[in-house]
């Protein structure tokens, strides 16, 4: 991935039944801290409407360096440890680059 180009990351996490509230509580801490990181342009958490157990992180970074800094942050590592016990499977993470995006 070229540095200097905006990066969109979409991550899907399926949570174990009955662990949704604990996941949201842990995720909110990570989301708030992530939004304050330099290079993070957009960082939101969504919940799938069907089934209500799959969560979607919608993230936008200034460049690949910002993605790497995020992944190395203490709050991201702490969230990863917490989520590992709450998730039903490994997260599905997709990194993308803009092709045709409205300003």
Image (tube, grey):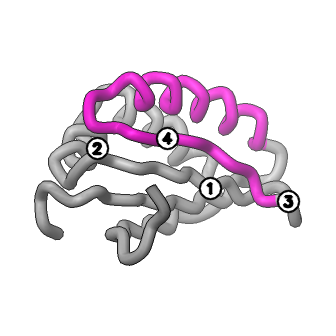
Mark 1 = which residue?
56
Mark 3 = which residue?
49
Residue 55 at what x, y percent from top left?
A: 67, 54
Does the magenta run of residues contain 38?
A: yes
Indicate whether 50 appears above or below 16.
below
Given residues 81 and 2, the one toward you in this image is 2
Mark 4 = which residue?
43
Residue 79 at what x, y percent from top left?
A: 46, 35
Q: Which residues are magenta?
A: 19-48
Residue at the (51%, 24%) spot, across then down: 32
Residue at the (39%, 40%) spot, across then down: 41
Rendered-image quadrant of the N terminus:
bottom left
Mark 2 = which residue?
71
For mark 3, give the secondary structure.
Answer: loop
Residue 24 at what x, y percent from top left?
A: 69, 35
Rendered-image quadrant of the C terminus:
bottom left
Distance from disc 1 to disc 3, alpha carbons, whole Å, reads: 11 Å
Marks 1 and 3, the one that precedes in the sequence:
3
Answer whether labels 1 and 4 touch (C-beta < 8 Å): no
Given residues 66 and 41, the one toward you in this image is 41
Disc number lying in front (4 or 3):
4
Near mark 4 (Cα within 10 A), the count class, few <14, some 14-19 or many ≥20, is many
**96 relative position to 79: left or right:** left
Q: Residue furthest right?
A: 50
Disc number lying in front (1 or 4):
4
Marks 2 and 4, the one that precedes in the sequence:
4
**21 relative position to 72: left or right:** right
């Amino acid at each position: 991935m070229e540095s200097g180009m905006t990066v969109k990351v979409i991550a899907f996490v399926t949570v174990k039944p009955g662990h949704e509230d604990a996941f949201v509580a842990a995720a909110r801490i990570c989301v708030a801290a992530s939004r304050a990181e330099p290079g993070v342009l957009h960082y939101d958490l969504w919940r799938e409407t069907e089934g209500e157990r799959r969560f979607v992180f919608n993230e936008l970074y200034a460049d690949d360096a910002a993605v790497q800094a995020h992944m190395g942050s203490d709050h991201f590592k702490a969230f990863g440890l917490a989520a590992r016990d709450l998730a039903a499977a490994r997260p599905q993470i997709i990194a993308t680059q803009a092709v045709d995006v409205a300003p």
